[in-house]
Image: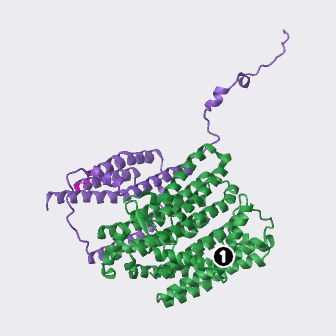
Chain colours: A green, B purple
Amino acid sequence: MMNIAIATPEIFLLSTICLILLMDLFLGEACRMVTYLLSIVALLATALLVYSSMGGDKITGLHDMYVRDDLGGVLKISILLLTVGIFVYARKYLREQDLWQSEFFLLSLFSVLGMMVMSSANNLLVVYLGLELLALSMYVLVAFKRDDGRSTEAAMKYFVLGAVASGMLLYGISILYGLSGKLDIAGVAAYVSVQNVMQNIPLLFALVFMVAGIAFKFGAVPFHMWVPDVYQGAPTAVTMFLGSVPKLAALAMFLRVLAESMAVAQPGWGQMLLVFGLLSVFLGNLVAIAQFNLKRMLAYSTIAHMGFILLGALTGTTQGYGAALFYTITYALTAAGAFAVLILLSREGVEAETLDDIKGLNERNPWYAFIMMMLLFSMAGIPPTVGFYAKLSIIDAVMQAGYLWPAVFMVVLSVIGAFYYLRAIKMMYFDKPDNTAPIEAELDFTILLSVNGLLMVVLGIFPSVLMGICSAAVVASL
Amino acid sequence: MTFEQIIFYLFAGVLVTAAVGMVTVRNPVYAALCLILSFFTSAGLWLLLEAEFLGIVLVLVYVGAVMVLFLFVIMMLDLNLDPLKEGFAKYLPVGLLVATVMAVEMVLVLQSGPFQTSQAAVPSPANNTEALGVLLYTDYVYPFEIAAVILVVAIIAAIVLTLRRRPDSKKQDIGQQVQVRRADRIRLVNMKAEKKA
């Protein structure tokens, strides 16, 4: 069945991107603000379209290539709204660093389109194409500061390793296709459900490659090598985007490819992800302690957080999926806020990226220091911030699924990980600032950052609304 | 062994040899030529499968357009190959070890549970260009459109990363040339008459 109208949000976003692309050509340098505002309006309007189509039953369209369900809706709205926030944060940085070009917004919009395609993919081919659309835009964004050697080097590493990971995913999909003759999620699920997964060696062989491809996109150990270099080398505005929104797309890929189409194979991929998740939590938290560069520290902290998400997701229960979705959304929000503080501290031509730059933030501006403290508390998982509740729900799901010692391991590593977050807070509050220049930001930046920081507490005290949405979406769709 | 099988093994053998040659030869021009050979032989394999459209497109697009451009680029850039080969001997043992271990593992895994081979359904005499076209614009129209978007991103990416406006390059500004006035170019100087010597 064709039913093109089902993909209205994607079609609308694509048309708007093309329109902005052409308009920008005629508007020129002086009116870049128009491009910026149009991009934000496009994202908000798309979010509205997605929202208006939610709540119905799960239906497929475009010859079963596209699925519209609440899970896709929740993921897409989070992706779109987070991107709006990131555009607002990025404006200050792009202007100061002489990167105020329309291509930043256009490429980001294209990658958002790729993530939306992944979120509602009903066919492995569509998952792959959405992933490539996202990845290709990301490679370019990382190289955006093209006269900076580090940015180019990061993009090159990301590109080569990303291509290898895509190749692995595609190889796994091709073997699965060879076995089942199906590419659509329902067809693969029907094939897998009648197999004895743990005895079917070719199926496990395909699964290994697909899990490796997905783990790369999460940045989980042992496929984490690109994360610190890319985070450090990319311009901070791009790091902020890369470090928050695509994690939702990675979770979407996991939920569509493994949870939805290969639910019966959970013993197979659960084992692999258990190893990846535990290693990520371990390595991420330990290596982050040794980092002096704040961007690298946040990169290792991301690896640890991705470990948590994988551990929640590998349980294969709706409780675990719901907790993983909640964790991913709140983590993306936290990471965006933390990178926004880095942008706040950057000045014309100077990038704030080491721990020295946040020294004595309290003396320079107590309010921003408080916001940053909330964000770091949330990452460390200290109540009453939302990070605590997110970690709690993941650990609860892991325990319910019968993994006792991994849960204990996660708690211990979280305590170790709290050290480097608390060290940053100590430097903000008890050290003397190296640089006492006042911190300036425009009103919209300040308001958004304040809301972002306060959301950490608000969501931490009242998590039930968001958690309810996440669980309901997972229950309705998987 | 049937005649078809002999042809298959011939093409497959040439394909693998050419592919190995592509990554091992020293001269990049030879590497590009090896790649062309491997494209040709895989096109032959496709023809053997009666997928004539794919075979022809592979030759037309990849050999005819992409690889020729590639050769142009390689020949125009005066590549210094020495830095690329640095450390080749150093990394070779590790690389070989990893490759061998992976290959052995894959062979062992795949031997234990063989893939069933079956005779593919003989396609109807209708040409597969038409069949592919119909599929691409009906069942697969959504992935097809996404692929088109990816190509747009590739164009934008190429421009973003390479377009540089050089202020010091000399070029004509036609508009300025047409709008020029006499006063911009000629300065009338009033000189005093000199006395006769």
Q: Percent position (x, y) of residue A268?
A: 38, 80
Q: Percent position (x, y) of residue B141?
A: 39, 55
When the figure is inspected, residue A449 is found, relative to residue B26, above or below; the finding is below
When the figure is inspected, residue A381 is found, relative to residue A213, above or below; the finding is below
**Outermost residue toward the top in this view:** B196
Residue type, mark 1 in image = Met
| Quadrant of the image containing the C terminus of chain A | bottom left
Hey, which quadrant is residue A97 in on the image? bottom right
Q: Is residue A70 visible?
A: yes
Q: Chain of mark 1?
A: A
**Outermost residue toward the left in this view:** B2
**What residue appears at the point 45 percent right and 57 percent down from the top-left corner?**
A5
**Foreground residue, B17 or A207?**
A207
When the figure is inspected, residue A376 is found, relative to residue A146, above or below; the finding is below
Left or right: residue A216 compared with residue A240: left
**Foreground residue, B63 or A123?**
A123
Mark 1 neighbour density, 10 Å: few (under 14) some (14–19) many (20 or more): many
